[in-house]
């Protein structure tokens, strides 16, 4: 009989990165990527002591009710709206994320979306691929929006927001931000960022990047009223969570040219998305891949592995998981 704690990994990752778990756990890793429903998850967690999961696995009271041995769930994502932390805490189950592992790759991608949306890259590429480039463009064709020298607004100034802000120096962009709480003076200086209220952020930003977590308080934080307050030349970028932006209101604002363009990596209800967005040329759409580089995805898995090992008293952070989300959980 195997005396090691049982660990479930919900999708294929990198064998060599999760290999250190084998010394301490009876590891059961999925070999095929798939979407699990609530019953599937409950069944797999039933006899587990720990699990490593991603954003597609939604876990709350129902999924852990029949898992008396479960002590730890490690998300390989910074966002954790797939985890009901209150339910997990009440059940005495620790949870962690991978904060810090993907800051730079997501910040890079936010800039890629910003530039692509502002300079109409998606629209131009579609035009070329469709065989429309038969004559030289006219002088007033393909007019986009300048990024260099414009004001960069950041809504949410956590690790990723700060990484985005630091990149603005090369574009000579003044940075303004709004956050739940103001950063300390030293961090503001490091990011060359100025704190403003939300109304000024919306009013002054030439590019607005949304980087806040999805909670009940932030759902549709950017809606019709906020979009109406932005400049008609402004570009909106969302690399946070789809529900933070009201996609229907955004589609209408883009169609009505109330803002110039948008770059979206996340959508409300993804992988489904508002069909109105598909009909618009002034929006760049990507399938939630801002962290998708080989190095970053490996780092995310390694961070999840480190959290699990640490929780069970192993590895360099033994006894102190570095990314614990619910330190108020009660050990059983």
Image (tube, helix red, strand yellow):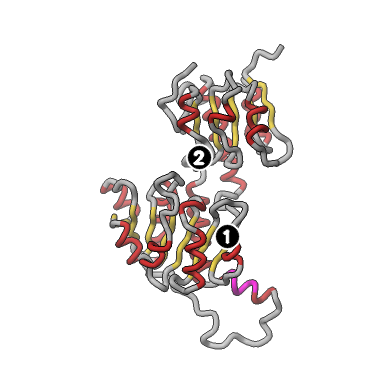
Q: Position of residue 53 (x, y in %)?
A: 60, 35
Q: Tell me, yes or no, whether the highlighted magenta stretch contains residue 43.
A: no
Residue that numbered label 2 is attached to: 80
The residue sitting at 63% across, 26% down in the picture is 45
Please report the residue visible at 58 percent of the width from the left and 65 percent of the height from the top: 276
Residue 255 location (% of width, % of height): 51, 72
User: In terms of depth relative to the viewer, which is nearer, 253 or 157?
Assistant: 253
Left or right: 144 as drawn, with respect to 54:
left
Classify mark 2: residues with Cα within 10 Å, few (<14), some (14-19) or many (20+): many
Vertical comparison of 3 with 120: above or below: above
Residue 125 on the magenta span: yes
Q: In which quarter of the image is residue 136?
A: bottom right
Front-lying residue, 68 or 200:
68
Q: Indicate the position of residue 115 as horizontal and vertical percent values.
A: 50, 66
Q: State the separation of the CA atoms marked 1 and 2.
A: 23 Å
Farthest residue, direction right: 32
Q: Specify start and end residues of the magenta stretch as a single range.
A: 122-126
Query: Few, some or many C-alpha atoms within 10 Å of disc 1 (few <14, some 14-19, many ≥20)?
Result: some
Residue plotted at (57% across, 70% down): 280
The label shown at residue 87 is: none
Ranked by sequence position, the earlier of labels 1 and 2 is 2
* Figure quadrant of residue 10: top right
Pointer 1: what residue? 274
Mark 1 and mark 2 residues within 8 Å of each other at the beta carbon: no
The residue at the point 73 percent across, 39 percent down is: 32
């Amino acid at each position: 009989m195997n005396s090691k704690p049982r660990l479930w990994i919900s999708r294929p990752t990198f064998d060599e990165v999760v290999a250190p778990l084998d010394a301490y756990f009876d590891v059961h890793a999925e070999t095929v990527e798939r979407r699990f429903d609530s019953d599937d998850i409950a069944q797999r967690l039933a006899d587990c002591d720990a699990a490593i999961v991603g954003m597609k696995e939604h876990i709350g009271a129902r999924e852990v009710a029949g898992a008396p041995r479960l002590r730890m769930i490690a998300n390989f994502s910074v966002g954790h709206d797939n985890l009901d932390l209150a339910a997990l805490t009440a059940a005495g189950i620790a949870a962690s994320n991978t904060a810090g592992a993907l800051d730079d790759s997501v910040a890079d991608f936010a800039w890629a979306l910003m530039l692509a949306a502002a300079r109409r890259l998606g629209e131009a590429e579609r035009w070329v691929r469709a065989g429309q480039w038969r004559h030289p463009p006219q002088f007033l064709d393909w007019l986009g929006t300048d990024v260099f020298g414009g004001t960069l607004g950041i809504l949410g100034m956590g690790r990723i927001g700060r990484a985005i802000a630091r990149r603005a120096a090369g574009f000579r962009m003044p940075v303004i931000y709004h956050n739940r709480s103001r950063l300390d003076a030293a961090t503001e200086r490091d990011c060359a960022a100025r704190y403003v209220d939300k109304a000024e952020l919306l009013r002054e930003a030439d590019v607005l990047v949304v980087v806040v977590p999805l909670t009940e308080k932030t759902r549709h934080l950017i809606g019709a009223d906020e979009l109406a307050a932005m400049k008609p030349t402004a570009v909106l970028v969302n690399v946070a969570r789809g529900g933070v932006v009201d996609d229907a209101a955004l589609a209408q604002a883009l169609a009505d040219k109330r803002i110039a363009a948008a770059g979206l990596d996340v959508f409300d209800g993804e992988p489904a998305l508002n069909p109105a967005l598909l009909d618009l040329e002034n929006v760049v759409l990507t399938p939630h891949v801002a962290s998708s580089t080989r190095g970053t995805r490996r780092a995310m898995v390694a961070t999840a592995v480190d959290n699990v090992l640490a929780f069970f008293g192993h590895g360099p952070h033994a006894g102190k998981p570095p990314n614990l989300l619910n330190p108020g959980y009660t050990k059983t």
